[in-house]
Amino acid sequence: MAKITVCLAAAVTLVACSTLPAMKVETDHDPATATQLRSYRTYRVLPASSYGSVDDAAMGSAIVRSVDETLDGKGYRQEASRPDFLVKWHVSVESRPQSTPMATPTFRDVGPMPSAGSTSVPVMVTRQYREGTLILDIVDPGSDTVVWRGSAQAQLAGSGEPQTRQARIQTAVRRILERFPPQ
């Protein structure tokens, strides 16, 4: 019974994530630091100084947990006193306009007079949507400089249910950190 419940939960999460909008992931670093980045073994995740335009402690906990799980899976270990690198993170949610063309009939198409080869006039329909951005910075603790940055951006869809949000956070963190360290 437990196996069925776990499989069902995994299937629901997979379907929920697969129907969400695409996620854009980018990373950047100074190529001169690539060797240094590959030598790192220990880390510490810093608490966010703010959640940007989002004030949600549960989301912050989900981000930190996902970073810990992902880095642990890559062989890194937490070190509170003298880590090789620090992880800083920031989240923002912004409202963005999205314009899409929509063909609408002209007055000739609706009138009683038949018309041969009538045309449609394209109309732009604009709607607002929310876009979320998660930024993960890898910081050298000695110089306090960002040596690697990864970000994920996606349109936020749905009602924002906790399970869906956590799955999206896990996906974003995993996709960002799969590019760390750079090869």
Image (tube, grey):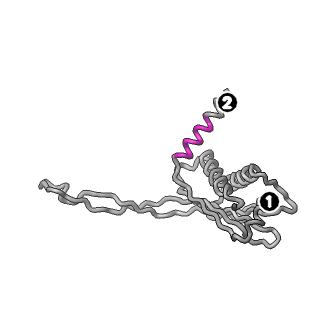
Give the residue number, with chain letter if any, for mark 2.
3
Residue 103, horizontal then vertical, whole percent? 30, 58
Residue 113, horizontal then vertical, whole percent? 12, 55
Q: Which residues are magenta?
A: 8-18
Q: Which mark is residue 122?
A: none
Query: Who is closer to the viewer here, 8 or 25?
Result: 25
In this image, 106 relative to 41: left or right? Answer: left
In this image, 136 relative to 43: left or right? Answer: left
Q: Amino acid at mark 2?
A: Lys
Quarter placement of the N terminus? top right
In this image, 115 relative to 72: left or right? Answer: left
Kindly report the distance in space between the C-alpha atoms of the residues bearing marks 1 and 2.
34 Å
Magenta-colored stretch includes residue 15:
yes
Main secondary structure of the magenta stretch? helix
Question: Alpha-carbon neighbours of circle 1 within 10 Å: few (<14), some, or many (≥20)?
Answer: many
Quick one: label 1 or label 2, which is nearer the N terminus? 2
Give the residue number, with chain letter if any, for mark 1.
44
Residue 156, horizontal then vertical, whole percent? 54, 55
